[in-house]
Every structure is written in C-alpha cells, then in structure tokens.
Image (spheres, rainbow, N blue to C red):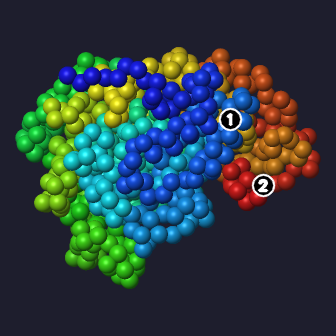
C-alpha cells in the first residue's frame, strides 16, 4: 500500500507558499534559496538546459517581497517555476533541445510575460524531446532527465524536464507544451498533474511551433488547484496569435459538472494496457472512485477517437511540423537526432491531395465522436497504458512511443481539453495516472473534478508523495452562492498595481474579452498609479477594448464598489460576444488633459508601446 507523506512542509505547492508568505513563516527570498539548494542536491543536470543566475532570482524575489508588504495578495507572487525550452524567456537562449537551432529571444513568450507580471519567478529552461517530437523523454542531446521514481525508466516526454522538476520539488509549477500528449504522459510517470487547456486558451506566441494549428501550452503542477491558479494567470486572448481564441469562440461552460454527472469509459476490447496488469487494476479502481463522487459510468465506442489519433503521425499533420522547421532541417540535417529526423522527414510522402483527404477524414471522425459525447459529460481514460524502461525504448523507439500516445494523440485534433492526474503507485514502485477529458471550454470544470478524483486516490503528489493540501478558504476553487461579474480595463488587470484589490476579495479571473466598438479609452492625467478611463460613445464610433472579467461574491462586489474613488464609476458594459457585464467607466470631467489611446485596443498594449 502506498504511504502518503502527511507532513507537507517541504511541498512547494502554490497554495502552500501563498499561505506561508501571507503569515510570514517564509519569504520569496528564502524559497528561492531553497530552490537553488534543491537543484544542486538533486544533481541531475539533464533536467535543465539553462538555469537563471542566482543573483537575478534573488532580485526578483526581493521585488515580490515589496509587493507582498504593500498588500498585494496575488497567489503567484514569489513562486518559482520552470519553462520548457521551446518557450521563449527574454535574454535566455531557446534551444528546443537542438544546440545548432539555439537563438536568444529579446522578448518572452506571451504566457511568460503574464506570469512574470503576476510576480512568479522563472528559475530556468528545462530539457525536452528534441523539437517536442516524442512522448518518451529520451530524445535529447542534453541527456535524459531522471525519472523521479526509478532512473531505469523513462521520464516521459516531450516535456520531460518540466515534469521532473515539479515532481522532484525543484519548482512549484512548470510550463510545457502538448501537441500529442507531451503535457500528460510525463505527468503520469512522475505522479503530478498535467493540464492541457482548450486549444487557443493560452497564447502560443513565443513558442517554437510543432504543429502550429494544434499546439498548446500545458501546465505541470502538484495539484489541480495549483494548475487552476496558473490557468487564471495565463489564459488570455492574444491578437498577435492567429490561433488564439476570443472568449466568444470558446463555448461558455459551467465551472463545475453537475453533482450527478455522466462519464464515458472505453469498452474492454478498446482498452489497451500492453500487458501491464497493474495499470489495468489502477484504472478499474479510478472508475469506482469516480462513481463514488457522483459519476454514472457508461461504455462508449472509443474507435473514432483512436482513428483520429492515428492521423497525427500517420496523416498529413506530421507535415505541419516541417512548416516551421523545414528550412533549418534542410540546412542542418545532421543537427537532428536520427529518430527525430526520421519522423520529421516522413512527411515527404504527403501532398496537397493527401492533406485534404486527411482533413475530410478528421471531420468525419469528429462527427462520429459527437454521438458519443451525447451520452457523457466527461471521458475517463488511462493517461498511458503502461510505462517503459529506457532500454525498452532503445529496442523499439517508434512503436513503443506510439503505444504511449494511444490515449493522447487525438485530443487536440478533436478539440478537447484534458487533465492528467495521479491515480496510484504500481507494485514496482512506479506511478500511474488517469486522464479526464471534455469538449472545449470545460477547463475549470475538469480541474474541479480532477481535484476531487486526485484527493480520493492514495498516492499523494510528486516524488515525495506529499498529501494534497486542503482547499484554502481564502482561495476557493469555485464560488458557492450568488456572485457578480466585473470587467476591468486598467490598473486592476492581472499583474497591474491594483489587481490585489480583487484577489484580496477572493476575486476569480474567468476570462478575457473585448467590448463592442462603442467605447473610447483615455490615459488619464496625474493619476497614481497610472489609470485609463473608459467612455461610452455612439454605437460604432469607438473601438473594441480589451477587458478582463472577474467573479466576485455579492458582498465582495459591494465592498469593492464602495471603495472606488472618483472619477471612476461602475456601469453596464456591452461585450463583443453579445453579453453585458458591470464594468468601469469614467466621469467626463476627468478627460481634461487625457490622451486618447483607443487605437491601442487596451491598456496593456498602450503600456507596451511606452
């Protein structure tokens, strides 16, 4: 039986650190020093490709402490995180695990910018399967990150370093990418949460493309509550990302599933465990636990999901990987690992006709899966059917990698969101996980249900198997009772100086949107901190202005509005998606001396222009 570590003092979960910073029992500086010491003691250089210098980390920690002392209660303040090395961090080389490909970005990826604005501290860039091509974690010239449970076994890929860094307790969370399962497979093999959001929910600007139309930034965390915090901080419509989706492009879903929900399970003949009886037992137990949480299981036809998954590498989508890398590979063929080169160059067999045939087949398969979704709210599947040793993969790298993608490769092709969570520890001491999936927009509900299912397991989280922390009453995963939505446009945006006034009231960011083109935005004169003023004009005489929409309980909303100083006020804003929400407006007298910044489309873009 698995022994869970009930003493969670050493856990670096976001929830735990936020509480420690709040009560003064620790500080961002102390945690950064702890992280540096843990990385040295872990002694696995293959986890990292580049580490941020200690002096820079401490400077960021000091800045976080200033914000905390000023009353800023953002839960990400001073929290250390890692970045998969196909995501840009300004002035830190991006390699995508190919030294000859390396470049030095001047700007950070959009998701990194948002995290740093929130006060999170990037510790370094982590190892990966070269060009994010693989689910094994052994396809890197920087060696293989150590599986945190048994070094003879693969860590999972392609986001291998990010997953092992979280599992080993070196950082609180990490970003990966997930095109074929790279944000879920290594989570299963290291006993942590791997969250793959709805496509387009997180910007991929500043991410080295794999299959650009399918790519997702993924989140590794110790708990689903932590993953939800990171999602709130990073989810954003990005006009610079052609594949980013505005709020009205993603179906609006409740933040929880109903108390009595329906979940689908593949039929026995469609389940594959590749001879691993322990993994099969763990999945059967997960079904029973999900039923105990109010779920009603039904057997579905998993065949169209599997057929769609095969298209990712056996169809023309493998050719999309060459769109971003073709010129580099043509000029540097020997810079790639042989197995990476073999996979990417296999795209030569697809022409335009084959591509359209692939699109048509996917459309037919997607339609077939809709019939299955009619009978379920959520899908429960194994994250992987088994795990392999490093020597197993060396013997048969292509087929066994494909086996690991049996339950993952269809996800983005079918536009699903997914969360992989720990399920149990097998008899050989290795962890195994399960995955919950749902149609787009169900991200919050998946994380809520995933949190419940994780808590019902007896495997803790990470290599130390720390107990999952109790849900903090200061930061609930969902609201009970009545609440109101509030749109903010300036100093109350995430990462801006007054955002703490929302987070201190347990406000929850639920989305980013735009107004109808009936508003103008002004940079007000002589305000501290700098603030914009939003003014309603004639229909169509303004522009669409970016807003963040936050949830507040009715009591918190009243307290917030009561503290608003002039010239600001609250009115009803009209949103691009046809909805209406309470939001900030500005009295006309304050526009004297103000600069019209409407053309920037939002306060963040205006600040960036400065």
> Which mark, by number, is residue 65?
1
Left-right relation of 423 to 106: left
Q: Looking at the image, is mark 2 or mark 1 nearer the viewer?
A: 1
Say if residue 147 shows up in the picture. Answer: yes
The residue closer to the viewer here, 452 or 74, is 74
Tell me the residue at 57%/53% (across/down): 53
Secondary structure of residue under mark 2: loop
Question: How much space separates mark 2 and mark 1, taking CA atoms?
Answer: 33 Å
The residue closer to the viewer here, 248 or 135, is 135
Mark 2 or mark 1: name the one nearer the start of the chain.
1
Q: Which quarter of the figure has residue 286?
A: top left
585 above or below 210?
above
Q: Residues within 10 Å of mark 1 (few under 14, many from 20)?
A: some
Secondary structure of residue under mark 1: helix
Q: Which quarter of the figure has residue 549?
A: top right
Q: Quadrant of the N terminus?
A: top left
Circle 2 residue: 597
Q: Position of residue 39 (x, y in %)?
A: 45, 45
318 above or below 151?
below
The residue closer to the viewer here, 581 or 98, is 98
Q: Position of residue 220 (x, y in %)?
A: 41, 42
Q: Position of residue 213 (x, y in %)?
A: 39, 60
294 above or below 501?
above
5 above or below 35?
above
Q: Position of residue 544 (x, y in %)?
A: 66, 51
């Amino acid at each position: 039986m698995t022994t869970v570590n009930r003493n969670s003092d050493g856990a670096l979960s976001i929830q735990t650190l936020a509480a420690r910073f709040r009560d003064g029992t620790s500080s961002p500086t102390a945690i950064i020093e702890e992280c540096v010491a843990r990385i040295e003691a872990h002694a696995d250089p293959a986890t990292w490709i580049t580490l941020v210098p200690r002096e820079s980390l401490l400077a960021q920690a000091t800045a976080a402490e200033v914000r905390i002392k000023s009353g800023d209660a953002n839960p990400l303040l001073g929290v250390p995180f890692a970045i998969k090395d196909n995501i840009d961090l300004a002035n830190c080389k991006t390699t995508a695990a190919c030294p000859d490909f390396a470049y030095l970005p001047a700007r950070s990826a959009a998701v990194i910018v948002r995290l740093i604005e929130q006060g999170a501290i990037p510790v370094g860039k982590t190892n990966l399967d070269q060009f994010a091509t693989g689910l094994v974690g052994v396809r890197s010239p920087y060696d293989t990150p150590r599986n945190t449970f048994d070094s003879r076994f693969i860590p999972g890929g392609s986001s291998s370093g990010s997953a092992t860094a979280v599992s080993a307790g070196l950082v609180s969370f990490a970003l990966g990418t997930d095109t074929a399962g790279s944000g879920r497979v290594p989570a299963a093999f290291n006993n942590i949460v791997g969250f793959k959001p709805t496509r387009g929910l997180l910007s991929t600007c500043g991410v080295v493309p794999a299959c650009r139309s399918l790519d997702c930034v993924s989140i590794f965390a110790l708990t689903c509550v932590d993953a939800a915090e990171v999602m709130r901080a990073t989810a954003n419509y990005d006009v610079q990302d052609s594949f980013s989706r505005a709020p009205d492009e993603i179906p609006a879903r409740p933040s929880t599933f109903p108390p009595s929900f329906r979940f689908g399970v593949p039929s026995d003949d469609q389940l594959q465990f590749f001879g691993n009886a322990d993994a099969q037992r763990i999945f059967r137990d997960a079904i029973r636990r999900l039923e105990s949480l109010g779920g009603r299981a039904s057997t579905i036809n998993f065949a169209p999901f599997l057929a769609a998954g095969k298209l990712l590498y056996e169809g023309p989508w493998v050719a999309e990987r060459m769109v971003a890398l073709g010129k580099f590979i043509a000029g540097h063929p020997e810079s790639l690992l042989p197995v990476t080169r073999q996979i990417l160059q296999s795209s030569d067999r697809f022409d335009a006709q084959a591509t359209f045939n692939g699109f048509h087949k996917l459309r037919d398969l997607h339609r077939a899966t809709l019939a299955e979704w009619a009978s379920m709210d959520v899908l429960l599947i194994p994250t992987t059917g088994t795990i392999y040793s490093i020597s197993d993969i060396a013997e048969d790298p292509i087929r066994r990698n494909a086996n690991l993608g049996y339950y993952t490769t269809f996800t983005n092709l079918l536009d699903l969101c997914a969360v992989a969570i720990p399920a149990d520890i097998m008899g050989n001491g290795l962890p195994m996980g399960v995955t919950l999936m749902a149609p787009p927009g169900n991200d919050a509900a998946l994380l809520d249900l995933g949190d419940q299912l994780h808590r019902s397991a007896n495997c803790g989280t990470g290599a130390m198997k720390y107990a999952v922390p109790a849900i903090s009453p200061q930061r609930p995963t969902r609201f009970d009772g009545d609440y109101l939505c509030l749109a903010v446009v300036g100093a109350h945006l995430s990462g801006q100086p007054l955002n703490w006034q929302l987070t201190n009231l347990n406000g929850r960011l639920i989305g980013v949107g735009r107004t109808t083109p009936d508003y103008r935005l002004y940079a007000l004169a002589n305000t501290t901190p700098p603030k914009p003023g939003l003014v309603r004009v004639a229909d169509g005489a303004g522009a669409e202005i970016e807003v963040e929409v936050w949830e507040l309980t009715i009591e918190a909303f009243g307290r917030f509005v009561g503290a608003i100083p002039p010239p600001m006020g609250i009115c009803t804003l009209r949103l691009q998606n046809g909805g209406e929400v309470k939001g900030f407006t500005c009295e006309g007298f304050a526009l004297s001396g103000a600069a019209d910044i409407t053309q920037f489309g939002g306060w963040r873009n205006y600040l960036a222009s400065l």
